Image (spheres, rainbow, N blue to C red):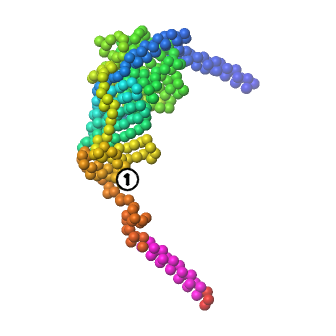
């Protein structure tokens, strides 16, 4: 029977298909059973190294590559040791941005980041910029300095309610310091397993792999096979947001224990479909563990004439810093459509640079609904006269029709 013949021929196919899936699954890295003691030893070492850091000061030289297009195969062109290519290997049209990063960290939710260098803009091309972030607990402040050739000719200052500095360059340090949003641990040992037959050499160092799955995210960490279990590579993949591949290179003369800042960090950001979004290389210029900080390191105030934007209330509030240190609220016509350049320039002690096209502000309505509008009262009277003329014409048409009917 045809049905019997179909069942006889499909059964071997199903068997071969199931066998193929079993072989494929067997080839994937599998967790090693009975390795809880090894996971605990690794995490104990990581947590001890991070906990020994009360304060940290690091200065990086950063190079960022912005791909001209989406390059799915771009990540596969480089060996495991390094992600960052030489300039000659970059595809035509890629942009390289060079900046410096000065980062200070203190336990208790205090961070300060200053970044200055190249900034891409849509109208001016690549221009210099200088921005500083300070976090104290759940509040983040940022100051972007104005310049004649930078993105804006005046200073801007923002205040946000946030318990984390959202900065891609800090992601590797946050991981090594074991500090995530809200000062929670970045690395958690629950659900972590050691992958079997997933050992490889990274920068000439034999490494083992630990992995953790959380919903749609997967974190894989390659570290030393023996103490101090120093981290050499971290891969974060996700089906719903950007993933990251981080490589850490340590100097040979570094101590074998304790917290060590890598002398080279490379970070690639990619989409869930593995399309490269950005590529970054951080070279350590200076690193101090547990330095002494003055109290004003983690304080940030807007300079005179700065546009202060407070994102905490709803709606957002716009203000300007006055010479006496207070922030004066701004009306919409004082800051919208480029009008703030004129507002800031009128404040004694304000620093403004260059000239931007400034639209003439429309004065607000004060005395009555029609004052300040184009035409004023004359425009209102013209509308009234037009309405009366229309009513008169309509009345005349009705009267003429009745006269015709009577005749």
Q: Which SS type dominates the magenta stretch? A: helix
From the viewer's side, name the closer residue of 97 and 293.
293
Q: Residue at x 32, y 29 (%)?
A: 295
Q: Residue at x 40, y 18 (%)?
A: 50
Residue 258's spot in the image, x, y percent? 36, 14
Instruction: Please give left or right for residue 66 compared with residue 215 in the image.
Output: left
Badge 1: few (under 14), some or many (20 or more) residues near its Cα, within 10 Å?
Answer: few
**Region of the chain picked out in magenta, as a range:** 382-403
- Give the number of marks: 1
From the viewer's side, name the closer residue of 299 and 218.
299
Determine the secondary structure under disc 1. loop
> Would you say residue 154 is visible in this rendering?
no
Which residue of the protein is positioned furthest toward the front in this rendering?
Answer: 324
From the viewer's side, name the closer residue of 46 and 368.
368
Magenta segment includes 398: yes
Q: Kindly identify which residue carries mark 1.
A: 331
Magenta segment includes 288: no
Residue 223, by quadrant, is: top left
Q: Residue at x 30, y 21 (%)?
A: 291
Residue 264, by quadrant, is: top left
Residue 99's spot in the image, x, y percent? 29, 31
> Would you say residue 259 is visible in this rendering?
yes
């Amino acid at each position: 029977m045809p049905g019997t013949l179909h069942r006889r021929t499909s059964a071997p196919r199903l068997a071969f298909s199931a066998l193929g899936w079993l072989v494929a699954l067997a080839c994937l890295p599998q967790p090693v059973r009975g390795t809880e003691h090894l996971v605990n030893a690794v995490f104990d070492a990581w947590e001890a190294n991070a906990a020994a850091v009360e304060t940290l000061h690091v200065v990086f030289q950063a190079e960022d590559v912005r791909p001209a297009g989406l390059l799915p195969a771009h990540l596969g062109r480089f060996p495991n040791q390094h992600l960052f290519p030489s300039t000659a290997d970059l595809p035509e049209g890629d942009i390289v941005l060079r900046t410096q990063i000065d980062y200070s960290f203190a336990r208790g939710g205090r961070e300060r980041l200053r970044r200055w260098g190249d900034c891409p803009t849509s109208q001016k091309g690549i221009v210099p910029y200088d921005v500083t972030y300070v976090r104290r607990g759940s509040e983040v402040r940022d100051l972007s300095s104005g310049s004649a050739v930078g993105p804006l000719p005046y200073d801007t200052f923002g205040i946000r309610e946030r318990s984390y500095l959202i900065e891609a360059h800090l992601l590797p340090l946050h991981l090594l310091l074991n500090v995530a949003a809200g000062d929670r641990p970045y690395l958690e040992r629950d659900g972590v397993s050691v992958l079997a037959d997933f050992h490889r050499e990274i920068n000439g160092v034999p490494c083992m792999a630990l992995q953790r799955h959380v919903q749609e995210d997967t974190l894989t960490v390659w570290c030393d096979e023996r103490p101090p279990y120093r981290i050499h590579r971290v891969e974060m993949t996700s089906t719903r947001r950007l993933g990251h591949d981080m490589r850490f290179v340590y100097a040979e003369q570094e101590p074998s224990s304790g917290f060590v800042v890598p002398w080279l960090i490379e970070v690639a950001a990619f989409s869930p479909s593995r399309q490269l979004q950005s590529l970054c290389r951080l070279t350590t210029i200076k690193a101090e563990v547990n330095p002494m900080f003055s109290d004003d390191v983690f304080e940030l105030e807007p300079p005179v004439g700065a546009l202060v934007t407070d994102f905490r209330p709803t709606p957002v509030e716009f203000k300007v810093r006055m010479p006496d240190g207070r922030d004066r609220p701004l009306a919409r016509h004082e800051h919208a459509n480029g009008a703030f350049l004129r507002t800031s320039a009128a404040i004694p002690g304000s620093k403004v640079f260059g000239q931007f096209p400034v639209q003439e502000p429309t004065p607000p309505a004060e005395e009555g609904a029609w004052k300040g509008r184009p035409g004023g009262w004359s425009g209102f009277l013209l509308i009234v006269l037009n309405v009366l003329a229309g009513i008169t014409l309509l009345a005349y048409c009705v009267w003429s029709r009745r006269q015709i009917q009577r005749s």
